Image: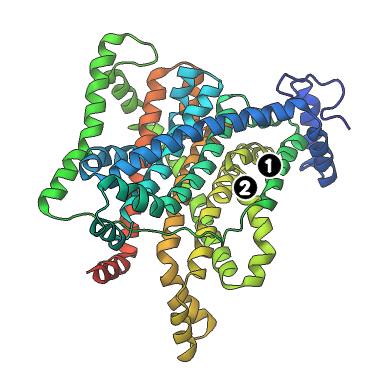
């Protein structure tokens, strides 16, 4: 069977453009495509050179982005970990920019680069650099002080101590950051194609969805997930959650607050001065942006667009946390169950969530159901994997004590497994929240009639720079506030763990 039906127009990227009404009729009459039809289409794609050209384009962009992310992220992270001066200068900017999802900047980057590979690379770098930078910094600061003191006692010079002790000890943390960044860069690269039209698999699946070719959409997803069978199991190569405590003191906290407020103030003042005399249609004066922000979001627009977006985010995130926690704890407790479901888990987590937006829109429509479903599906895997890891790392001595005092299995889970795994689980929940926020925006950018992503993307398509900037700023503020709120909840929930860590360190 040929990859595409005879008579349909196919672009150079290998995806059908013509006869969309016929495909739409077939979709409406057939619903979800049959498994045989999807497999048949997937087999046809194997022999299609245009499909492999799209795959090559996507992975080329991911490779370029990863090279930039690794070089810049490790260099900056190591510098922040080694020198307090560099940390004090860059940490406030990092704290300001890190919670802002990279997908928020898609309309702006699309205006600058257009639907090209540069769009995908830029978006992937903006989103993927933070895990590498953070884990590089944590890895350097988590090196055993005894090993460093031993090297100093042996008379090793400073540079030799860093290259022979610090960097090798921090390598596992580097690897963890790079692994997380690779997933993010792949997701954002495909998202740039689905939402912005950059070449590659993202644009391919978007075109298949627009023409109603459900079999092609599901065949691409099947091909992407099939490679997960050879991936490493999630319970091997566990990640360590390292809590870094910073120096207290009134002057230290005051200085950090001042430094934390400096980046946004400098950016706003610099932009206002530059845009006032630039007369660039894509970068309007700050006063015009503030006025448009007030018109859009300090009126009925908040109830029309912001509230539905936040409702979808809350519902999808709640479903993701509940399902991920239940499944993760169950798989962590039972080795047999874990061995049975690991291939299915690998298959699901290997799919970039943004790739699932077109098929879910085809199945559930453009209403809230598809958006909640994509948020719940994509955000559940970080919680599930963290729960598996946390439960399996429970101290065996505590489990022996629970058996000796006669705790039931349910009581053991409640009083032993969950408290022990809570730091790791909260780490997965934080990643899940960031994924949920990205998917909320992306789902509204692609197929919606209301919402923050819809308003921002429509403004970009209409070259309405004021509305685009107003939407981008609100999304950035919401991302920052969401991350800050979660940090407060996590500190409160894990206050016992932080106190115990400090006591043991003293």
Q: Earlier in the sequence, mark 1 or mark 2?
A: 1
Q: Quadrant of residue 335?
A: bottom right
Give the label on residue 224, or none.
1
Residue 502 sits above or below residue 462 on the image: below
- Residue 415 in the image: state x and y as whole percent: 43, 78
Q: Residue furthest toward the bottom?
A: 405
**Residue 84 seen in the current view:** yes
Which of the numbered marks, if any, corresponds to residue 287? none
Query: In this picture, is 289 found above or below 308?
Result: above
From the viewer's perspective, is 263 left or right of 346? Answer: left
Instruction: Determine whether 488 is above or below 500 in the image.
Output: above
Reading the image, the residue beneath label 2 is: 350
Coloring scheme used? rainbow
12 left or right, relative to 473: right
Label tally: 2
- At mark 2, the secondary structure is loop
Viewer-proximal residue, 475 or 191? Answer: 191
Which residue is depicted at the point 52% across and 37% down? 185
């Amino acid at each position: 069977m040929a990859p595409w039906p005879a008579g349909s127009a196919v672009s150079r990227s290998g995806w059908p453009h013509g006869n969309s009404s016929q495909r739409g009729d077939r979709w409406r009459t057939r619903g979800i495509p049959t498994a045989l039809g999807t497999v048949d289409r997937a087999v046809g794609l194997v022999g299609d050179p245009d499909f492999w050209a799209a795959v090559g384009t996507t992975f080329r962009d991911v490779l370029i982005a990863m090279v930039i992310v690794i070089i810049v992220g490790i260099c900056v992270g190591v510098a922040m970990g080694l020198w307090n001066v560099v940390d004090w200068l860059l940490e406030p900017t990092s704290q300001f920019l890190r919670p802002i999802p990279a997908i928020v900047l898609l309309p702006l980057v699309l205006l600058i680069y257009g639907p090209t590979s540069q769009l995908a690379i830029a978006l992937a770098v903006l989103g993927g650099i933070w895990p590498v930078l953070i884990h590089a910094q944590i890895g350097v600061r988590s090196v055993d002080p005894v090993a460093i003191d031993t090297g100093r006692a042996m008379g090793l010079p400073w540079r030799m101590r860093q290259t022979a002790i610090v960097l090798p000890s921090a390598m596992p943390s580097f690897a963890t950051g790079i692994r997380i960044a690779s997933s993010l860069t792949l997701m954002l690269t495909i998202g740039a194609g689905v939402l912005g039209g950059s070449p590659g698999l993202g644009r391919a699946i978007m075109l298949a969805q627009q023409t109603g070719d459900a079999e092609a959409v599901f065949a691409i997803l099947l091909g992407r997930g099939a490679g997960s069978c050879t991936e490493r199991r999630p319970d091997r190569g566990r990640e360590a959650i390292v809590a870094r405590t910073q120096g207290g003191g009134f002057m230290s906290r005051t200085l950090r607050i001042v430094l934390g407020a400096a980046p946004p103030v400098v950016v706003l003042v610099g932009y206002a001065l530059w845009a006032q005399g630039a007369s660039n249609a894509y970068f309007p004066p700050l006063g015009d942006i503030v006025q448009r922000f007030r018109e859009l979001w300090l009126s009925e627009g908040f109830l029309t667009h912001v509230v539905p977006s936040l409702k979808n985010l809350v519902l999808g995130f709640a479903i993701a946390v509940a399902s991920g926690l239940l499944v993760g704890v169950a798989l962590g407790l039972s080795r047999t169950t874990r061995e049975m479901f690991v291939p299915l888990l690998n298959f699901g987590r290997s799919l970039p969530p943004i790739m699932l937006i077109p098929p879910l829109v085809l199945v559930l429509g453009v209403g809230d159901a598809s958006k909640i479903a994509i948020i719940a599906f994509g955000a559940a895997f970080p919680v599930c994997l963290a729960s598996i890891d946390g439960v399996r790392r429970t101290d065996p001595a505590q489990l022996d004590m629970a058996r000796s005092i006669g705790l039931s299995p349910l009581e053991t889970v409640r009083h032993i497994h969950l408290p022990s795994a809570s730091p790791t689980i909260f780490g997965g929940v934080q990643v899940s929240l960031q994924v949920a926020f990205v998917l909320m925006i992306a789902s509204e950018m692609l197929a919606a009639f209301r919402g923050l992503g819809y308003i921002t993307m429509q403004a970009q398509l209409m070259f309405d720079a004021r509305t685009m900037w107003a939407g981008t700023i609100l999304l950035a503020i919401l991302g920052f506030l969401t991350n800050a709120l979660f940090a407060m909840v996590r500190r409160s929930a894990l206050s016992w763990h932080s106190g115990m860590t400090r006591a043991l360190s003293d």
